[in-house]
Amino acid sequence: KMTCRIIDLSASGAAIAAEHRPPLKSNVLLGKVHSRVVRNLEEGFAIEFLHEQLAETLEEAVTAR
């Protein structure tokens, strides 16, 4: 569990600002959304959602605890 900030969000993934970066290909949860780490960024990492998300429920799903 870690505190992070969503930099960018789309139906297929997100860019995350965080102090620690999980290893590439790690499975992670962003809120309730199952995801995989696909890239390291200067201030964090990028994830790809395992299943494309619906625009109507995306924000609620990724911010849920």
Image (tube, helix red, strand yellow):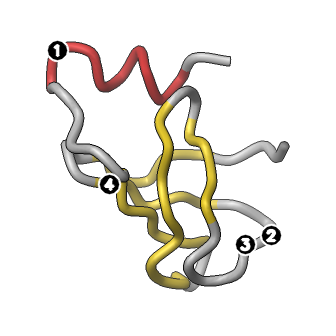
> How far separated are the C-alphas under marks 4 and 1?
15 Å
Q: CA distance from mark 4 to mark 3?
A: 15 Å
Viewed as shown, does residue 51 lie left or right of 14?
left
Q: Secondary structure at mark 3?
A: loop
Rendered residue at 64%/70% (across/down) = 26
- Per the image, the residue denoted by label 4 is 13
Residue at x-position 60% and y-position 43%: 29
**Total of numbered circles in the picture?**
4
Q: CA distance from mark 2 to mark 1?
A: 30 Å
Amino acid on which disc 3 is placed: Pro
Q: Earlier in the sequence, mark 4 or mark 3?
A: 4
Question: What x and y, as percent, mark residue 13?
Answer: 32, 54
- The answer to which of marks 4 and 1 sits earlier in the sequence is 4
Q: CA distance from mark 2 to mark 4?
A: 18 Å
Q: Are marks 3 and 2 in contact (CB under 8 Å)?
A: yes
Label 2: which residue?
20
* Residue under label 3: 22
Image coordinates of residue 27 in percent, x first then y, are: 61, 60
